[in-house]
């Protein structure tokens, strides 16, 4: 979300407010900024706003190719079981994703059908068609780094799950899953292939 677009729903470390952090997947892998804010939704629900960014060694064309290779997301994104392209019409793709959010004894299957608008060469917009979210909007943006040294990758999302998460762990679950997704995606993007 992207992908493992569905488990991009796991974010914060606090139960309210905003948290920002610098995170790295493993030593030597790309570090990324991750900010999560929980706000009240229009219907009083809990909406999470996610902002993440990083610099990777891969050039924008390579990053674009990886971010639009939806059916291979499950090969490297944790907790993503399957991704299936349901339809493609020019730059609009409808994708179904099956994943699972886990935290201690909590486990929730998540099914999402999203519409992806590919705005080559630098932006991918994702919106909910149906599934286990009330709200799901996300955007990937790519910016070439000076001197052909790589790409700045930004991910922003707004999500609101339909299912209930125990309040004592909800933000930790969201933060953990988003951080794991970003670490795996950025590790894959950081290759100079």
Image (cartoon, rainbow, N blue to C red):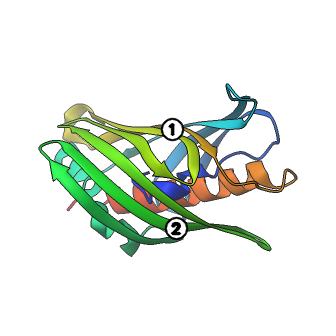
- CA gap between label 2 and label 1 equals 17 Å
Can you identify the residue that label 1 sits on? Answer: 157
19 in relation to 183, above or below: above
* Dot 2 alpha-carbon crowd within 10 angstroms: few under 14, some 14 to 19, many 20 or more: many
> Local crowd at mark 1 within 10 Å, few (<14), some, or many (≥20)?
many
Where residue 183 appears, as percent x and y from the top left, is 50, 58
Residue at point 24%, 35% (across, down): 122
Q: Position of residue 168 (x, y in %)?
A: 88, 53
At numbered mark 1, what does the secondary structure look like: helix, strand or loop? strand
- How many numbered markers are drawn? 2
* Quadrant housing residue 160: top right
Disc 2, SS: strand
Q: Nearer the viewer, residue 13 or 30?
A: 13
Q: Single out the mark in the foreground, 2 or 1.
A: 2
Residue at position x 30%, y 51% from top?
Answer: 57
Q: Residue furthest left?
A: 90
On the rendered structure, is 61 left or right of 5? Answer: left
Q: State if disc 1 and disc 2 touch (CB < 8 Å).
A: no
Closer to the camera in the image, 96 or 143: 96
Residue 123, quarter of picture? top left
Using the image, determine if residue 9 lies above or below residue 155: below
Residue where numbered disc 2 is placed: 99
Residue 50 visible? The answer is yes
Sequence-first disc among 2 and 1: 2
Is residue 69 visible in the rendered image? The answer is no
Give percent across and percent down for residue 157.
51, 38
Left of 90 or right of it: where is 45?
right
Residue 78: give x, y in percent of width and height: 51, 70
């Amino acid at each position: 979300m992207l992908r493992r677009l569905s488990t991009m729903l796991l974010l914060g470390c606090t139960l309210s407010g905003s948290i920002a952090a610098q995170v790295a997947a493993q030593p030597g892998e790309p570090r990324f900024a991750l900010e999560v804010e929980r706000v009240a939704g229009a219907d009083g629900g809990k909406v999470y706003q996610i902002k993440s960014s990083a610099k990777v060694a891969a050039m924008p064309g390579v990053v674009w190719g990886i971010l639009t290779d939806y059916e291979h997301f499950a090969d490297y994104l944790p907790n993503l079981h399957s991704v299936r392209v349901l339809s493609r019409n020019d730059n609009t793709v409808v994708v179904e994703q099956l994943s699972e959010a886990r935290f201690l004894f909590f486990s929730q299957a998540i099914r999402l059908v999203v519409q992806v608008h590919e705005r080559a060469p630098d932006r991918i917009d994702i919106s909910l068609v149906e599934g286990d979210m009330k709200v799901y909007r996300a955007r990937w943006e790519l910016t070439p780094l000076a001197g052909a040294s790589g790409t700045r990758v930004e991910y922003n999302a707004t999500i609101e799950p339909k299912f209930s998460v125990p309040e004592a762990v909800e933000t930790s679950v969201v933060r953990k899953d988003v951080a794991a997704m970003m670490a795996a995606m950025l590790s894959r993007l950081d290759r100079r292939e």
